[in-house]
Image (tube, rainbow, N blue to C red):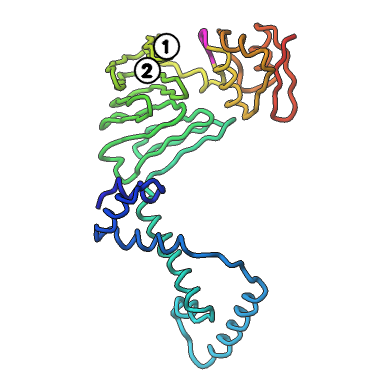
Amino acid sequence: MDQKLLDKFLNHKATEQDIQALKGDPETAELVTLSQQVTEIKYKGFEQQKNWRVIQNHIKQKSSASEKSHDSNIFGRLFKLSPAPEVIWRVAAVFVLALGTYFFLSPNNIDLVTPAGTHQIWTLPDGSEISLNAASKASYDPESWNKDRIIELEGEAFFDVTKGSTFSVNTSSGVVTVLGTEFNVKVREHEFYVHCFEGLVKVQTADTLLMLSAGNGMRIEGGLLVQDRVPQGARPDWIRGESSFDDAPLTRVLDELARQYDITITYDGQLSPMFDSALFRGSFTHQDLQVALKSICHPFGLDFELADKKVILRKN
């Protein structure tokens, strides 16, 4: 079975040549045919009252009949209802396809997700801990965890890894590999950070291989590799309830503020040139939005208006 072709077909990206190849494979031919048949099903509306009367009559008939005999086959009772055979076939086709999709497409991965405005800590099967920053997602396969400890990460996470086999964090920007340590990984749009607080971390990108010891970090911004220093044995600022920046673009700081407080931030288009060039050095708290906004806005002479979960920025 060609899994790549099957994935393309199930995601509606297969060409006619791909479909013919799947039909020629005994393992996928029936699935392709069934899928195409289901797409031809036309929904004619749901006759609620009529169908409910049919079900009630059926229940009454079965209740009186149960005094004479007991049918323990639940599927037998279900399919003795009186819809037309064509309807039953179509429902069965959808049901079978749903099961096929579950087994073919639903991996055994466990997903860990934090929406905007929240942080969360999870304990992994080996006792390691993962702390997810706001609007982040991690996933792993529990069945293969003892063989290869692999985490897929989108967003930002701090890891406290128990010693053992290799522990890898896969991201869209690179792979971080350790044996047992404390480190932070951040992968956002145009950002890739790895900071090692304890132990040793290997970072593999498309064109770079780095070994980071405790107290060292790296980041890639705009295609440039920059080395960082971090306090040994400490924790990332966001774990302590702050977001810190060292000459970061103001737009990136505002993106992080929106992520931490689950808010929407807008500003007049005339401010765009300033926002594109302004750099912010400092931090903001995750505990008080008013204080956080003042920390960011006052250095740039900005006023803000806060209503519900919307913030409007203006030049004062």
Residue at x-position 62% and y-position 75%? 51
Q: Position of residue 143 (x, y in %)?
A: 31, 46
Horizontally, residue 235 falls left or right of residue 176, namely right
**What residue would you read off at disc 1?**
230
Question: Which residue is the site of mark 2?
Answer: 196
Q: Which residues are magenta?
A: 244-248
In the rendered image, residue 212, in percent from the top left (x then y), is placed at 31, 15
Of residue 102 and residue 74, the one placed in the foreground of this image is: 102
Secondary structure mostly taken by the magenta-highlighted segment of the chain: strand
Q: Amino acid at mark 1?
A: Val
Q: Quadrant of residue 291?
A: top right
Residue at 39% x, 51% y: name it: 10
- Name the side, left or right, on which 293 lies relative to 163: right
Report if residue 109 lies within the magenta region: no
Image quadrant in which you'd find residue 262: top right
Secondary element under disc 2, as helix, strand or loop, is strand
Residue 96: image x %, image y %?
40, 64
